[in-house]
Structures are given as C-alpha cells and as structure tokens.
Amino acid sequence: MAGRGEQRVGLLNGVAAYGLWGLVPLFWPLVDSAGAVEILAHRMVWSLLLVVVALLVVRRWAWAGALLRQPGRLVLVTLAAALISVNWGVYIWAVNSDHVVEASLGYFINPLVTIALGVLLLKERLRPAQWVAVGTGFVAVVTLTFGYGQPPWISLCLAFSFGAYGLVKKKVALSGLESLAAETTIQFLPALAYLLWLGARGEGTFTSQGTGHAVLLVSTGLVTAVPLVCFGASAIRVPLSTLGLLQYLTPVLQFVLGVLYFHEEMPPERWAGFALVWVALAVLSWDALRTARRNRAKALRLRAEADGMDGTARTDGVAERDGAAEVGGALGADGAAEVDGASAQRGQAV
C-alpha cells in the first residue's frame, strides 16, 4: 500500500489530470479557424509523434510485437481508434460551436451509459440503487429533450462513443500510453493524408496562418498526452474509489466554463435535467462506495479467519484473492471500474 506521501502525489496528479481535461474547452477555440476535422487530424498526427518519443524514453516496445501477432486484438484496437476518433471530433466541434454545456453533459452521463451497456451487452446484473440511478438518468435525458427541443444528440454521442470505447478497451487490455500509441498509429496515415490533401488544395491552415497557429496545432499532441501521464501517475497511487470521484471534476469544470465563461443559455428545463443527472450520479457514487467498503470488510474478515486455520499461507492467499475480486466486482458491476479504467483514456476523450 502506498504511503501518505505517495498518496498525496497521486491525488495531486489526479487533480491535475482531471483539471486539465476539464479546462481543455479553453484550448480548442484558439485553433478554431482550422475547423474541427483539420484540428482532429493534427491531434492524431502530433499525438503519435509525441507518444513515440515517450516510448523511446521508457523503452516499452514488447507490447507492439505481441499485439501484431494477435489479429483479433488488432481488430479491437482498430474499432477503439474509430470510436475515439468520433468522440474526439464531436467534442472539438461541440466546443467550437458553443455547445460546451451539452458536451459536459455527455461526460456526466457517461457512467450511466457504461452501466446500461454492461447490462445490454455483458448481461451484468444491477443492484436496486443502480437501477434507480439509471432510471433517473433516463428521466433526465427525457427532460433535457424537452429543454433542447430535441434529444441532446451531442451528449448522447459523446457518452455512447466513449462508453463503447471503454468496453472495447477492456478486451484489448493495454495501458494508457501503449493504447494511445496503438490507436494513433491506426489514425496516423488517414490523418496525414487528409492534411496533405488540404495543403495541396491550399485549404490547410498549418502554414498559412502564422507560426503561433502552427505551434498551437502541434500542441494538440501535448493536450492529449500530458493529462494522460498525470492520470497514469495517479492511478498507481490512489484507490479506485478516489479516482471514481475525481473523474467528475472534468465535466463539472466544463459545465462551469460553459455557463460562466462561454455564457451558454441554461433555461429552467435544462437545469432540471442536469439536476436529475447529478442526483443519479450521487446515488451511483454512494452505492459504489458502500459496496466497496462492505466487500473490503468481508475480505479482511476472510483473511483474519484464514490466519487462524492450518495451512495459513494457502488459505490466506485464497482469501485475499477472493476478497480483492469481490471489491473489484462490486465496483465493476456499477460501472465504476469500467469508467475508471476508461478514465485512463479520458485524455483521449477530450
């Protein structure tokens, strides 16, 4: 278990990661003259180059050979790259089209969507409190549909693309840096071809709008990678439950920016919809923490009982393993584990 100093470092890195992701709506308007698709292509290209440098520094290449020998995982990585491309593109367009509040809603409801996908696709069983949270979230979407005059398509697209991305990532089982490298490798050639095509037509902005604009486009790689590095430093030092709560910092900051900085409208119906979403997330978080605490206590009790039996080493190992599995299962069942695992890619999401 990490000491207090390590946990403090982990907490600070977690706040930095989710804080940077929450403040990223301030960055995309700086390059909005390029258009969402060109910005997306630059993000893909420069992210890969930055990740390659990082991998050269840490000398982590063994995963690449293993991945190339597994066609099934390559297909999943390709699917993940497609899903995150949709997520990236929609988010950039939403921010630069004055839909920051609606984009933040997508990441508020993402945990609820993850749960729904788990039930529909993985046949997971939910506890009563989880059903209450999902039902409240559904009512919130209906309320927001009336508020917007149509379903909140941006929010739903962001939530479902990222929820599906998280499910695919579970199957691929790559860490954050390797995952970003694999996905941006797949994105790289189409993105580079698009940028070259734009340049040949004289429609690209990389060389036509000055050095400052070019530097900002190159910085899209840093916007992707730096928070991810901070998250990685946090994930190995703080409990999963802490990360699960910290993740809400991102949409909260986005929402505050949308309302107070970008001055987006929030009529009463939208406030009502957001309030219902927040109630659902409060129920979900309370249930996840309660279940994790209960299973942790059970694991410790099993371990204590095993210590008093003959064959302590063997039984204690089984008890510790089963207890840990139950804690993980409790979090996974309500989507917290999936969301936290997917949160390792939140830098890729926003």
Image: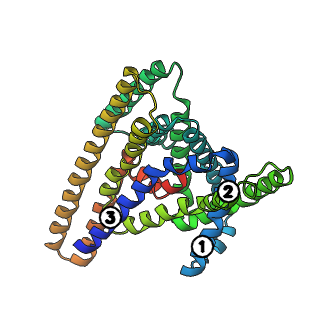
Q: Look at 45% across and 40% down and name the residue there.
A: 104
Q: Residues within 10 Å of mark 2 (few under 14, many from 20)?
A: many
Kind of residue at disc 3? Leu
Q: Which mark is residue 42?
A: 2
Residue farthest to the left, as pictured = 308
Q: Residues within 10 Å of mark 3 (few under 14, many from 20)?
A: some
Q: Look at 45% across and 20% down and name the residue there.
A: 147
Local SS, label 1: helix
How far separated are the C-alphas under marks 3 and 1?
29 Å
Please give the residue where the numbered disc 1 appears in the rendered image. 63
Image position of 337 (left or right of 55): left
Q: Answer with mark 2 or mark 3, whichever residue precedes in sequence.
A: 3
Local SS, label 3: helix
Kind of residue at disc 2? His
How far separated are the C-alphas under marks 2 and 3?
29 Å
Above-or-below relation of 195 to 234? above
Image position of 337 (left or right of 217): left
Residue 154 vs residue 19, the one in the foreground: 19
Q: Which mark's residue is nearer the viewer, 3 or 1?
A: 3
- The answer to which image quadrant residue 13 occupies is bottom left
Q: Look at 51% across and 18% down and name the residue there.
A: 149
Above-or-below relation of 134 to 91? above
Whole-percent x and y of residue 175? 51, 65
Whole-percent x and y of residue 322? 30, 62
Q: Which mark is residue 12?
A: 3
Local SS, label 2: helix
Q: Which mark's residue is nearer the viewer, 1 or 2?
A: 2
